[in-house]
Amino acid sequence: MSALPYLVAGWICVVGIYGVVTSTNLIHLALCLTVTQSSTYVLLLTVGYVKGGGPPIFKGVKLGTTSVDPVVQSLTLTDIVVSVTVLALILALALDVHERAGTIDPDEIATLEG
Amino acid sequence: MSRRVRIAVFLPALAVFAALLAWSLLAIPRFGDYRGPYGYVLNRVATPERHMTNVVTAVVFDYRGFDTMGEEFILFIAVMGVVLLLREKGRERPGDLTDAIGSDAVRIGGSLAVGVAVLISLWLIAFGFITPGGGFQGGVALASSVVLVFLVASWRAWKGVANEAYVDPFEGLGAGGYVVIGLAALIGGLPFLTNFFGPGVAGTLSSGGSAVFVNWAVGMEVAAANLVLFGEFLEEYVVPLARS
Amino acid sequence: MIIATLVPLQVVTLTLVAVAATAVVLTRDVQRQILVNGFYGFLLVVLCVVLAAPDVALSMLVVSSVGYPLVVLIAIARSRSK
């Protein structure tokens, strides 16, 4: 019944989505999107945890000691490095919108014309 | 619809979503009670079979090497998107800026720090199969330590170190090199991305076989991609300063 | 019953992570938000260490200390100068 880690991951996801919808600044919106993304990291890491386990590195450590799952860690670490580039792409789009519409508030951007 | 109406419609939907999420999260096996067989199998088998003591790097570059190729191409395409958006045709190149750092202590200490940081990043990439590290972490650390040059010296020093004409080919070389290493195994009659060198001795730098080359290709690609990214953004920052 | 198999250090770190995530979203001023985000990234690094994941902690450390503040601060400066 230890559900606190999973509930924390769910709370971070929900809070991030709330931040995206009620945002008044495109850059604030991009950072709330990264908060939602980090909830998946927390969920992945806590799903792979083995009780009393150490890191899955075996240099100088006897084979067979309890270790946590290495597969979810590999998914998480490549995801973190890629998220910087994706955030930069979102910010470049936001700067482009700011140049064309003159404002960085998503509510004030004029609707499609022409 | 106006902002207030939109938020009033959104909040009940969010509450329903949160309730469903909590319901599904409470049905997962409890924390610490890991049941899947792959974690246990890989921890037992990775070091005797592949002679790599860091099982996470073995999974990233050897067992699931095909996924890492996909991740690398996500990076490549995202950087290409940023460059297309920010590199306009008629953009003026800023000449000399007088906004350089004047303090000698910062410049001397910073130059030493850049050297140490570059060495540590290269160590992280090279020893990724033995202790925590690998191509991804070391690549980002290498890009960050080169950005330090801009912070402790001037814009001209940064341009001398990270000129676009030199860094762009490295990015393509890293991304293409991964595919070439995979194809080299294909030419020899083995499946794509097979580890065709001997596995080496565990715990030393020769462990890993052809995964070592894949590791360095990824490290080079991640570092170059991040440098291109940081360079584009820094130029966005510097051009208004030069104009004023 | 909800925290039966957790070590106290993990409970404290998870609670701090939840509080910091709420703080990042509720900070409306963008320049302050990037600082709070740096603190949140550091708490995630501590969480990764406590959950026995050193590779993930390494990559989160470099990314949240240098990668995020650099791109966001330059975007803020550019969006204010025009």
Image (spheres, rainbow, N blue to C red):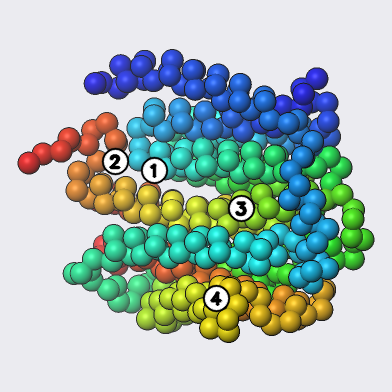
For the view shown, which residue lies furthest in the front direction? B189
Residue A104: mark:
2
Label 1: which secondary element: helix
Residue A75: mark:
3
Residue B182: mark:
4
Viewer-nearest of labels 3 and 2? 3
The reply to whether residue B188 is visible in this rendering is: yes
Give the residue type at disc 2.
Answer: Ile
Sequence-wise, the earlier of marks 3 and 1 is 1
Residue at the spot 84% in from the left edge and 46% down from the top edge: A53
Residue at the spot 64% in from the left edge and 42% down from the top edge: A44
Residue B123: mark:
none
Sequence-wise, the earlier of marks 3 and 2 is 3
Q: Chain of mark 2?
A: A
Q: Position of residue B93 (x, y in %)?
A: 27, 73
> How far separated are the C-alphas under marks 3 and 2?
34 Å
Q: Chain of mark 1?
A: A
Name the foreground residue: B220 vs A68.
A68
Viewer-nearest of labels 3 and 1? 3
Residues at circles 3 and 1 in contact by the CB criterion of under 8 Å: no
Residue at the spot 46% in from the left edge and 76% down from the top edge: B176
Residue A27: mark:
1
